[in-house]
Amino acid sequence: MKISSLIVFSVCILLILGGVASMNAAIPMRDQKTHKSLSFTMKKISDSTESQKPIKAGYLCPTCIDILDFALADLAAAADAGVIGSCYKLCNAIIGSGTYAWEGCNVICDAIGINVFIDIIKKADLDPIYACQLANICPVKDCTAKRCASFLNSGFIPEKIQHGFPTTFYSGLQVYNASGPGEVVFTLNGAFSTENMMQRFYQPNGYTPGTYSIKFTVTTKDDDAKALEWLPGLYYAVVDVCEGVCGDLKPHTRTLAQAKANFTLTPPPWPGKN
């Protein structure tokens, strides 16, 4: 059976397990804390009038990224620990992550071979998008234009809020040239009890020309369980849209657009109450 046919056949296994990631959904990065204070939506609201040639993304690309996002570190450690003669033994390193991850690992490994899979794990260096591209599961579509995308009318509404209340970052994103799988990263710095707050959301289908709406909602409620305290002051947000993993130096990686905005947090009307 050809490699491509085996990978396609594997979809049946993952569907039975109920673990296939949605092709249209952004995937939150698993190796970072998922902040209850942040929520994210991104929707395409209009297509470019230019002719569209959809990026030929295999429908296992979102699943591959989802699996390797939280499995790549453990797989790399297992590969470095010694000689591994089979996919079964290698994938046993992530069996604690659940049946979905273990089966997905075996499917990918069996399709491309144990030696190739280990080589990809080492070359990817904890980058799940690049790993899935090396495995020919995710497409490569580099934007080579000088300007690939730009943000439109970015800012928080409202710009001034009382402690305990939400504010939302709104922006349009105009994509001029298509690019492959990437991510959207929201980073917030300010007068809270943590160095910064960062959340990454994978975009396994990449970006095609047109206009997108991006929305991040920030809820400024203290979280004792995570030792998160929101203090009055100015908060600065940076939103990056990237091909590949933002800030990485691997092939098929580039920052497409960046937006900055801020909001001011004031004390609650009654001290000690949200």
Image (cartoon, rainbow, N blue to C red):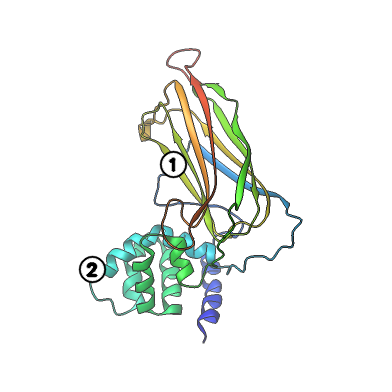
Number of residues whose C-alpha sits closer than 10 Å to that of mark 2, classed few (under 14), some (14–19) or many (20 or more): few
Query: Does residue 28 appear left or right of residue 122 in this picture?
Result: right
Residue 51 or residue 272, whichever sits in front: 51
Specify the farthest residue to the top: 270
Specify the farthest residue to the bottom: 1
Amino acid type, label 2: Ala
The residue labelled by disc 2 is: 81
Can residue 19 be seen here? Answer: no
- Placement of 103 over or under 273, stated as above or below: below
Q: Secondary structure at mark 1?
A: strand
Amino acid type, label 1: Met
Number of residues whose C-alpha sits closer than 10 Å to that of mark 1, classed few (under 14), some (14–19) or many (20 or more): some
Image location of residue 92, percent across then percent down: 33, 69
Residue 105 or residue 217, whichever sits in front: 217
Q: How many marks?
A: 2
- Point out the frontmost of discs 1 and 2: 1
Which comes before the other along the chain, label 1 or label 2?
Answer: 2
The residue labelled by disc 1 is: 198
Image location of residue 138, percent across then percent down: 53, 67
The residue under the point 45% across, 21% down is 233
Image location of residue 197, percent across then percent down: 42, 37
Q: Which mark is residue 177?
A: none
The residue under the point 42% across, 61% down is 250
Image location of residue 177, percent across then percent down: 64, 57
Dot 1 and dot 2 residues touching (CB under 8 Å): no
The residue under the point 56% across, 29% down is 167
